[in-house]
Image (cartoon, rainbow, N blue to C red):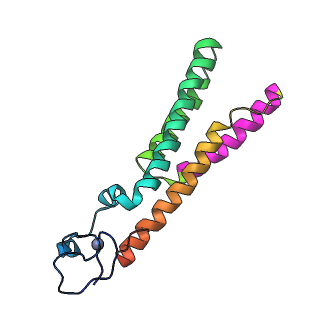
């Protein structure tokens, strides 16, 4: 059989995994999606998802300060709501759609700012989007693989 914690091949009658020492009773209780996300092998992926969300929250904060407070541009509230919504979707929902939308929004943002100011700026949203796309797709393929084979990413 296969250890459901580390994915190592172990003897069928083993009570503990010979590789990671996890009790093999895990076999009868596969991890839920949220437990899977907390597994040590998902640490890097989880870190990237959190980072992308934090960048989006920071961009929302910056937009609030620069556009709403300083420039009195109230319509920028829409951007703030979008950025926070995308951040939450990525962080809590591990949403690939939110990751793609953030990237597209990031590209549009860079183009618009370039046309307005002649400078390349605002590319942090684009960076967050690309990190989020990589990490959310990685997460979903790892989760699918775990469901099919019980194996964790190496
Ligand atoms: Zn193991």
Judge left or right: residue 112 versus residue 11: right
Task: State the extent of the magenta-drawn residues as a range.
Answer: 98-117
Q: Name the one closer to the observer, 44 or 65.
A: 44
Question: Residue at the location (53% across, 43% down)?
Answer: 52
In which quadrant of the rendered image does the C terminus lie?
bottom left
Judge whether residue 12 is colored magenta: no
Q: Is residue 59 above or below residue 39?
A: above
Question: Residue at the location (46% across, 60% down)?
Answer: 139
Residue 29 lies in what quarter of the image? bottom left
Residue 17 in the image: state x and y as whole percent. Answer: 24, 75
Residue 44 in the image: state x and y as whole percent. Answer: 46, 54
Residue 142 lies in what quarter of the image? bottom left
Residue 42 in the image: state x and y as whole percent. Answer: 40, 58
Judge left or right: residue 103 versus residue 113: left
Judge left or right: residue 115 versus residue 14: right
Question: Residue at the location (52% across, 60% down)?
Answer: 137
Image-quarter location of ligand 1: bottom left
In which quadrant of the rendered image does the N terminus lie?
bottom left
Question: Residue at the location (41% across, 66% down)?
Answer: 143
Q: Is residue 57 above or below residue 28?
A: above
């Amino acid at each position: 059989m296969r250890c459901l914690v580390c994915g190592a091949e172990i003897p069928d009658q083993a009570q503990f995994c010979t590789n990671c020492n996890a009790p093999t009773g895990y076999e009868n209780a596969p991890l839920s999606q949220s437990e899977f996300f907390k597994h040590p092998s998902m640490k890097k992926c989880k870190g990237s998802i959190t980072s992308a969300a934090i960048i989006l929250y920071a961009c929302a904060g910056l937009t609030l300060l620069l556009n709403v407070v300083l420039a009195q541009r109230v319509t920028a509230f829409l951007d703030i709501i979008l950025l926070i919504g995308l951040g939450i979707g990525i962080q809590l929902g591990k949403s690939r759609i939110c990751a793609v939308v953030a990237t597209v929004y990031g590209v549009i943002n860079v183009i618009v700012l370039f046309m307005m100011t002649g400078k390349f700026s605002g590319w942090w949203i684009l960076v967050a989007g690309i990190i989020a796309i990589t990490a959310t797709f990685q997460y979903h393929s790892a989760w699918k693989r775990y469901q099919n084979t019980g194996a964790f990413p190496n």
